[in-house]
Structure formats: C-alpha cells, structure tokens
Amino acid sequence: DNSELPPSVLVSELLDAIHRGFSVPEGETVEQHLVVPHRLQAFNRAYYAKGSRLFSYSDENYRAIVEKESSADASRPFMNTPLDDPPEEWKTVSLQHLLRFYDNPAAFFLEQRLGIRIEGTAEPLEDREPFGVEGLELYSLKQELLEVVLGGREPQELLPLYSSRGILPPARHGELVFMKVLDDVREFAETVQAKTSGTGPLDPLEVDLQLGGFRLTGRLAKVWPQSLLHYRCAKMKMKDRMRAWIEHLVLNAVNHSGYPKETCLVMTDDEKRFAPTAEAALHLEHLLNRYWQGLSMPLRFFPRSSMAYAEKESIEAARKEWRDDTFNNFPGEGSDPAIQRCFGSGDPFDEEFRTLAMELLMPMLECMNEG
C-alpha cells in the first residue's frame, strides 16, 4: 500500500546508538544524514535518475525501463480512419446486441466488425482437492440454486448433482459448504420475493420499436406487475446497471397497457430503482446512434470509468477505475484485453470520452434512486 516499512531491529538499534553518542546540527536528524529510503522494486526509475541518491548496477533492469518508456512514446492509435458503415440491414438491432455492445464496446467492435474474439487465459487445472467453492463456479452454483428456490423446488435434492460435477469438496465437508451457500441463496431469495409481493411474472413483453433510423426488436422477460425486476446473487457491477437501464428505457418506450414503468435492480450488496421516464425513446435513440458510431471505430465509452467520471465529473475518479488495484488484486478496466487492443495502455480520457460519459450516463443517474 506504499506505506514505509520499518527497518530491521539491527538497523534500529544502530540508529539508537548513534542518537546517544553523536549530535547533528539543530533542526536536522541522524536519519537525514545516514538513512536512504529505497523503493519497493529494484526496477524503479529512481535508481537510474540523474542526481538521485539511489543507484543500481543492474543492466537488465535499466534496459527494461528504457524499452518500456521508448515503446510507450512510440505507441500508435489502433485506428486512424473509421471503417465504412455496416450494411443498412444492421440498423435493425436486436435488444441482446445492444446490451452486449454496452457491456464492452471495444470487444463488440473487434468481434462484429473485425472477426477478432479475444479469449481469456485458460486457468491451470488444480492439482489438489478443493476445500471450498470460489469464482465463477460459486457464482454459477448460487444462480442455479436461486432459480430453484424462487421456483419453489427443493434445492437439497441437487447436492448429489453438484458433488458429481466435482464442484464441491469431498465427503462431509462438501455437504457443509453446500448448505452454507444454500443459506446465502435463501436469504437473497427472500429479498427478491419481497419485491414481487408473492405474485407471478407477467407474460414476456414483445419489443418492436422504430427509433429514428433504427428498428429495435426483442423481448423483455422478468416483468412483474410492480416493476421490471433484475437480480443476481452477486455484487452489483456496472454491467448490471447499464443493462437494467437499457431495458428500463425499452419498457417505457413500449408503454404497453397493464405493464409497469419502473425497474428494480437487486443485488446482494445494493439496490437501485429507475423511475418512469417520458423521454425513453429519445434516450434509446442516443444509445443507438452511439452504437452505430461504435461499429465503425472503437467507442471511447468504458462502462466503469465512464460512470466514475459521470458521477463525480472527475478524471481522477475515472483513472481510479482504469488502473489496476494491485493491493486488492482487482484489475482495472484498462487491463481488459479488448480495450488494451483498441486503446493501448495509455490514458484515453480525452474530450470524446467526457462527452460520451455525460451524454449516455447522466440520464441514467437522474432517473436512478437507491432501492
């Protein structure tokens, strides 16, 4: 966390002895004369800076710094000229395509226009027995159990199934882990059921909207008489907020009799509500126009960083989301492989980024309330 580390006991004792046996000019300390604070990494640039008290004889680290800085200076944009517009029939947009685009515009551009699908690094196989359930396996387990609980079925009957998949630890320990996960799921299911007031969902809402030069088609499911309800047994992410917002706009733009105008987003750590909006069609048209722009050239819209900027109107807030949080082992948005391919590792926060963030996200923030 970049805080200073105390020296070893031997160094501390030596400094204490010097304090007792020697004096220094008034206003100064022994440490200022004798102690040189070193950097955490041996490849820090300070070891090769002119006039620095720090020094290094490592030729390997020096060449690495020179290479890093020269490659950063020589970095070029991924594209200078936009691609031609897609065929006109692409202006008939499915709701699922629009949702996927705003999950990650850079990845969508690479996949749809250039045929480049960037796969994640394959995880190595575990060479020991699992003692818990983590990551994607834990999320999938919770989601499956949640649908079972909400459907009124008995989830404990699925214990042999998950054991046979190798997801759970062996023997009795696996049963205990399963019951702990099930308790968490049941607690969250009660929160979801409270939002539905014990009623069943309405029929899926068919969508066919003409918005400017676009036609938006699809289907909205999980609509209750009270609201369109989004839920996941996980912590809230920007992807959840963006998807709920787009579907909320669709719900209001369709404006079907007997269907609600509010949307509720429920996660394990937070809840959000979107109030009815009379300008849903206009906001959707803006989203579709930027979608069309993002099919010809990577769009400088990065959901997490853009939201941080829109909320605080601060580039520093956006940079905080962009950079890796190494202390908490949390990757920054700038580390996404598709975003790196399109924008490199430099700072992408120019005027276009600021304009897009405010245009696309301020209507959401104005319409959104805490649950």
Image (cartoon, rainbow, N blue to C red):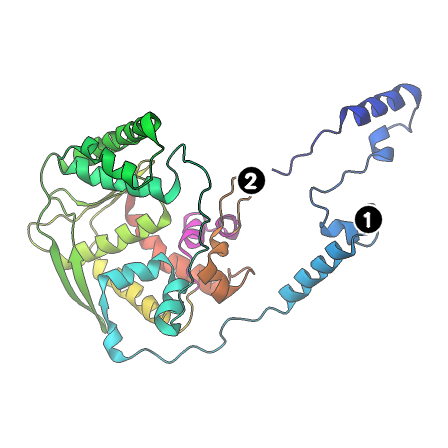
Q: In which quarter of the image is residue 297?
A: bottom left
Q: Position of residue 2 (x, y in %)?
A: 64, 38
Occupied quadrant, residue 347: bottom right
At label 1, counting other C-alpha atoms closer than 10 Å, the crowd grade (few under 14, some 14-19, many 20 or more) is some
> Is the residue 367 above or below the residue 78 in the image?
above
Q: Residue at x 81, y 38 (%)?
A: 36
Q: What stretch is highlighted in magenta?
A: 300-322
How many numbered marks are there?
A: 2
Does any portion of residue 282 appear in the rendered image?
A: yes
Q: Which residue lies furthest to the left in this view?
A: 258
Evaluate if marks 2 and 1 touch, with contact meaning CB atoms under 8 Å apart.
Answer: no
- Residue 145 drawn in magenta: no
- The answer to whether residue 308 is magenta is yes
Q: Which residue is drawn at 75% across and 50% down?
A: 46
Kind of element beneath mark 2: loop
What residue is drawn where x is 27% and y is 63%?
Answer: 97
Query: Quarter of the image holding residue 3?
Result: top right
Give the camera-side residue of 335 and 132.
132
x%, y% of residue 318?
48, 51
Please state if 219 lies on the left or on the right of 168 as rendered. left
Q: Which mark is residue 55?
A: 1
Badge 2 density bin: few <14, some 14–19, many ≥20, Cα 10 Å: few
**Which disc is residue 327 wearing?**
2
